[in-house]
Amino acid sequence: MPRAQAAKSNGFEAAYNQAVKFLAVRMHTVGELQAKLLRRFSRDTVRPVLKALEESDFLNDMRYAQIFVENLKRYKDFGYYGIKVKLQQRKVPTEIALAALDEFFSPEDEMMVARRVVKKLKRMKRERYEQVARSLSSKGFHGDIISQVLREGFIS
């Protein structure tokens, strides 16, 4: 085997092994893993590693987005736009992020999370209409969801 080809295969192997180590710690998006690998390896080495990982289904942005949305919906207090920003921060491609939100974060889900946020804010003695509206807005809830949950929480 010529020396240049051996170096290329060793580079691929080292980058692949490093990628598997990153994935063993937690799931990554293609964009996240690419950014981490590019710190140590060339673009020509990283591209085939990412392709191999995608083909073997170790990397799957749609699955990542689905799990991420489900976890945020269950355990955090973000609305539609807040989750969209979080997905973008994780380098999930926009079309995949939107598809995951459409499929796994319905308006009913957003309303459920918004009600949970309002209850939490009331426990924290942040009960003024403006404070609650501002908090919901800063967490990325749709305007119509904010209006509806405020009508429920402040008229009843």
Image: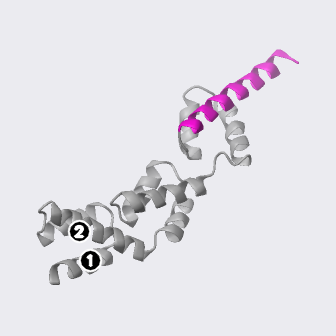
Per the rendering, the mark at residue 149 is 1
Residue 121, x across and y down, in percent: 19, 63
Question: Start and end of the magenta stretch?
Answer: 1-25
Does residue 6 appear left or right of residue 150 in this picture? Answer: right
Type of residue at label 2?
Answer: Val
Magenta-span inclusion, residue 30: no
In screen coordinates, is 21 left or right of 116?
Answer: right
Q: Main secondary structure of the magenta part?
A: helix
Q: Assign a secondary structure to mark 1.
A: helix
Q: How far across and how far down the image is residue 129, in percent?
A: 14, 72
Residue 93 in view: no
- Classify mark 1: residues with Cα within 10 Å, few (<14), some (14-19) or many (20+): many
Residue, disc 2: 118
Find numbered disc 2 in the image and state the secondary structure of the residue it sits on.
helix
Q: Residue at x 76, y 19 (%)?
A: 7
Residue 10 placement, left or right of 39: right
- Of the numbered discs 1 and 2, the one sitting upstream in the chain is 2
